[in-house]
Amino acid sequence: MKITRYTREARRSYRSRILHFLRENGPHSRTELTAALKLPRATAALLFTELIEQGILAEQEETFPEVQPYSRGRRRVPVGLNENYRLACGLVLGRERGFLGLTNLAGQTVDRETILYTEPSYRTVLSEMLKGLEALKKRNCLSNERILAVGICMGSSASGLVEGSSLEEKLQRLRRDLARVLPHPVAVCSTVEGAAEAQAVFHQSPSDFVLLRDAKEVGSGRMDLESCLRIAGRTYAGSRKQAGGFAWLFGQEHPETDFCQRVAEAVRTISRITDIPAVYGIGGFFEDHQLMGRVNQILKDWGEKGVQEGMVQEDQRYLAPCAAAVSACFYGNPE
C-alpha cells in the first residue's frame, strides 16, 4: 500500500487518540478501543501490532470475575500503556540554580539533581545544565535511544538569563540552542505551563482548570503570579506566554493590601472570566498552609471557592519539563 501524506497524518492522529484514550481510561481490549474511537478496523489492527512491537503498548494481565460465561471467538486481552517505554529528561532554569529530572511516562521519578550556577551568565548556565544532563544519563546507564525527549522550562524569575523581548522569544532561543547539541527532540514551555501539563498528564486532574504559580521578579523582590489555563485538554498561556501575568497588579493602588488579598482577587477574577471551577496553586507561597488558609478564608467570605493545592510542588518542579516532553513527543495533540 502506498503511504501518502494523508495516510501518514491520519495514522498519526489515530495513534494519538489511542494513547490519549488509554491514558485517561486505562487498559482496554483492541475491540473496545476500535469501537470507542470509531477507528477503521484494518488500520486499527495494524496500529495495535506496531505499537505493541515497538513496546509502546503492552498486553495486561486479565482479572476474571468469579463466574466467567463461556464465549466463542478470540479472547479479549486488554492492552495498556507501557509506562517505561522510554524516559523523559527535564531541565528547569531558575534564577540562581537549575533543576534536572528524569521520569518515566507516568511521571515517576527515576533521578533528580539540583545545579548551583557558578556564574549567572547564559553560556555558563546552559553549559552546566548540559553537563548535568549528561551526568544524569551516565549515572543511570542510559543510551540516547532510551530518552524520549528533553523538556526545558523557564519562568519569569529566570528570564533575565536569556536575551529576547518576550518569554516566548527566550524559550525559542533555548530550544534552538539545545536542538543544535542534543541528539533528542526538545520541547520548551514556561514553568507554569509545564506544571499544568504535569498536573494533567501525570496526576489526571480535571480537563479544565487554572494553575497559579508564585514568582519573584528579578531584582525587585516583588511577589508576582504566573498562571495558565487548561481548557478541553489543552494548555493556554497566551501567545506571549504571559496570560495571567496581570495578577500582581491587583491591590497595587493600595500598598497596604497584602499579597494574600491580591492572590484572592486574582483567583476570583480568573474564575469569573473563565468560569472554570478548579484552581490549583504551586510554588513557595502556595506551599505555606497558613498563608493559603488566609487566601481561602478571604475567598470564602466573598462566597467564592478556594484554591486547591496542586500535586506538582515547587521541589518537584523538574516534573514540569518532563511532562512537557511527554505531552509533545509521546501523546502529541489529539485531533
Image: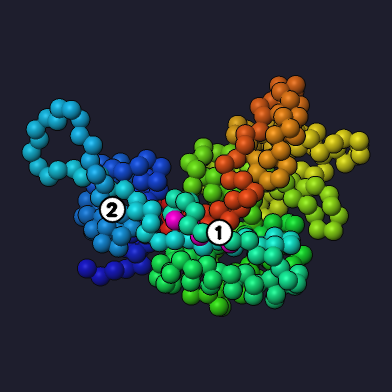
Disc 1 vs disc 2: which is toward the camera? 1
As rendered, which of 103 and 182 lies closer to the eye? Answer: 103
**Which residue is at the front of the view, 245 or 35?**
245
Amino acid type for the residue under numbered disc 1: Arg
Q: Which residues make up the magenta segment?
A: 100-104
Q: Is residue 103 magenta?
A: yes
Q: Position of residue 148 (x, y in %)?
A: 44, 64
Q: Which residue is mark 1?
A: 112
Badge 1: residue crowd in 10 Å (few <14, some 14–19, many ≥20): some
Q: Quadrant of the N terminus?
A: bottom left
Position of 42 compared to 84: left or right? left
308 left or right of 65? right
Considering only order in the chain, which callout, 2 or 1, is on the residue closer to the N terminus?
A: 2
Q: Which residue is mark 2?
A: 58
Q: Quadrant of residue 248?
A: top right
Compared across the picture, whether 62 is left or right of 73 comes to right
Q: Nearer the viewer, residue 132 or 49?
A: 132
Vertical relation: 181 (above or below) 154: below
- Coloured how? rainbow
Of all residues shown, which one is farthest toward the bottom?
180
Report the residue at 73% width, 56% height from top.
Answer: 156
Q: Is residue 269 visible?
A: no
Q: Position of residue 187 (x, y in %)?
A: 54, 63
